[in-house]
Amino acid sequence: MAAARSTGREPIRARQLEQLRDLIRAVRPANAFYETKLGGAGIDDAITSLEDFTERCPFTTKDELVADQTAHAPYGSNLTFPAEHYTRIHQTSGTTGAPLRWLDTPESWQSMLESWKTVYRAAGVSPADRALFAFSFGPFIGFWMAYEAAAQMGCLCFPGGGLTSATRLRILLENEVTLLCCTPTYALRLAEVAKLEGIDLSHAKLKTIVVAGEPGGSIPATRKRIESAWPNAKVFDHHGMTEVGPVTHEWPHEKNNLQIIDAAYLAEIVHPETNQPVADGEEGELILTTLTRTAMPLLRYRTGDLVRPETHGDALILRGGILGRADDMVIIRGVNIYPSAFEHILRPFEAIAEYQVIISQKTEMAELHLRIEPAPNTDANALAEHITDTLRTQLNLRIPVEMAEPNSLPRFELKAKRWIRE
């Protein structure tokens, strides 16, 4: 894998090998799911190297996990400890298939809080910060971890569940909140509501917006739009998954890139078709082994996230963040398109309030058309023509553009669902 070629990473990899041995020692034979997989591959805690592990250990896929939880309902057989040891349960969003339930013991939960603290420290968060978590707390894992990690760091924390956007803005201003955690889409939505309510965001004390859940935080156009809307704040990106935990944070040396949290994850990047490691600078699929989440671990998990790795000293960097997902790609007249491409293209247009991409499959060939909700006082015809020309230039495709009525397209607190199949 890409990380193996940098001598600056040798101490990290030596530590990861010891963590991997500890993980395997805990998993075998207690965890029925991995006892079968590891036993069949002849892998035990005497593994001699990370390369030996990645060559022999089979991948874990989401389809396998779904099938296991169906066959061994409700939680599956990927449990390292008896059921009474678990105190947390969360569930994936189900945006890419059937949802998964994920359990944690207090120890595994704390290990992920430590990773979230790593994210916060990289963002410059300190106990002096006042944090607002602008989302409804449900079975999705990320917000619970973000809140508890900030509280453990000594931040004053405001839960924002069950509130309107206008109320959240008042809390942010009245309490002089300095840290906002939300999706990129919702950071823009709050700014939109502020404009409707006549709220001047230049008076806000907010200095950091930690975003996740969508690739926008590492897309320059989306970052610029958020930071323009919140003139005193900087965007700080990170990404994670319910079944894995917080995986990366923005690389402090250069924005729009993510850094793997090596203390908690063994990361590989492989070619999605050949399964061979890619070289630095080449695009591949991110494969993760959770080194500290022992209670319900994942070994060589195929995340489906497409990334471009680079090694810089002792850091493993994902250039441009999460580029897309292997299962999100659509082929339109021979052109491979990912949702992130539309973020890059459309976010520079301040006249776009919201958008949807409609995928239709009425014939053997898929087609796209774009639905745009213009901002107030926008010349809709001129905007449609400009967007059509831009899409044709950047994607080499003519994509029909339809204008929507004001406030007709949905707004999102969690992951935005802008790609619709008809």
Image (cartoon, helix red, strand yellow):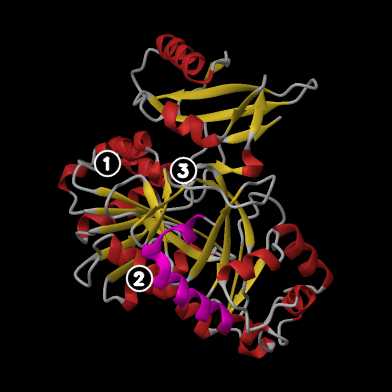
Q: Quadrant of the N terminus?
A: bottom right
| 167 and 111: which is toward the camera | 111
Number of disc labels: 3
Could you tell me which secondary element the residue under label 3 belongs to?
Answer: loop
Check disc 2 and report the residue beneath it. 117
Q: Where 92 sits versus 11, above or below? A: above
Residue 10 within the magenta-colored segment of the rendering: yes
User: Can I make out residue 268 in this image?
Assistant: yes
Q: Amino acid at mark 3?
A: Gly
Mark 2 vs 1, N-terminal side:
2
| 36 and 167: which is toward the camera | 36
Residue 143 spot, x, y in % from top left:
45, 64
- CA gap between label 3 and label 1 equals 28 Å
User: Can I make out residue 298 in this image?
Assistant: no
- Specify the label residue 281 is tagged with: 3
Q: Amino acid at mark 2?
A: Lys
In the displayed structure, does residue 198 sit left or right of residue 384? left
The span shown in magenta is 2-21
Check disc 1 and report the residue beneath it. 227
> CB of mark 3 within 8 Å of CB of mark 1?
no
Mark 2 vs 3, N-terminal side:
2
Q: Where 410 sits versus 398, above or below? A: below
- CA gap between label 2 and label 1 equals 23 Å
| 170 and 106: which is toward the camera | 106
Q: Residues within 10 Å of mark 1 (few under 14, many from 20)?
A: some
Which residue sits at x=76%, y=73%? 41
Residue 278 spot, x, y in % from top left:
56, 48
In the displayed structure, does residue 187 sit left or right of residue 53? left
Helix, strand or loop for the magenta stretch, by majority: helix
Q: Quadrant of the C terminus?
A: top right
Q: Residues within 10 Å of mark 2 (few under 14, many from 20)?
A: many
